Image: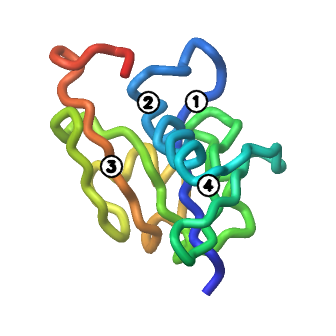
Amino acid sequence: MKAPVVVGLGNPGRSYERTRHNIGFLVADELAKRHGGSWRAKKKAEAAPISFGQKNVTLLKPTTYMNNSGTALAGYKAEQLIVVHDDLDLPAGAVRVKVGGGAVAERADTMVCGPLFSTSATASCGYGSASVAPRSV
């Protein structure tokens, strides 16, 4: 099996930089920082190879808007992907990890990953209700 790819979902640009929809980017940035990764341009994404213990991992941040992120995943197999995204239905700070799509996994991720999503792993990061949670994280 090829090395795992952690895909942090978000939207490009300063206006989205620290919004809840960019939780995936924030997670990828933190992993790169903690594990010595350097971001490099790669087609429709930024990639940072890191070592996680004895395992080589690629961090990926699509440079397209979230609903077009699937184009950055061309060439990857679903079994390689761990997709990190925001989830309004989870309390702020909660994380849910699972394999395959689901009710929430749906909307953003099926548009993003298409058929890859049915067997890729996802890490949903909660930010709570929009009426409770601040827009910036």
Amino acid type, callout 3: Ser
Q: Nearer the viewer, residue 100 or 4?
A: 4
Residue 124's disc is 3
Q: For residue 21, which numbered disc appears in the image?
A: 2
Quarter of the figure with the N terminus: bottom right
Where is residue 59 drawn, in percent x and y? 62, 54
Determine the secondary structure under disc 4. Answer: strand
Quarter of the image where one finds residue 29: top right
Q: Which residue is mark 1?
A: 11
Q: Earlier in the sequence, mark 1 or mark 2?
A: 1
Tell which circle, 2 or 3, labels the residue nearer the N-terminal end.
2
Q: Amino acid at mark 1?
A: Asn
Residue type highlighted by circle 2 = His
Q: Residues within 10 Å of mark 4 (few under 14, many from 20)?
A: many
The answer to whether 43 is drawn above or below residue 118 in the figure is: above
Report crowding for label 1: few under 14, some 14 to 19, many 20 or more residues within 10 A (C-alpha). many
Q: Give the number of the disc on residue 59.
A: 4
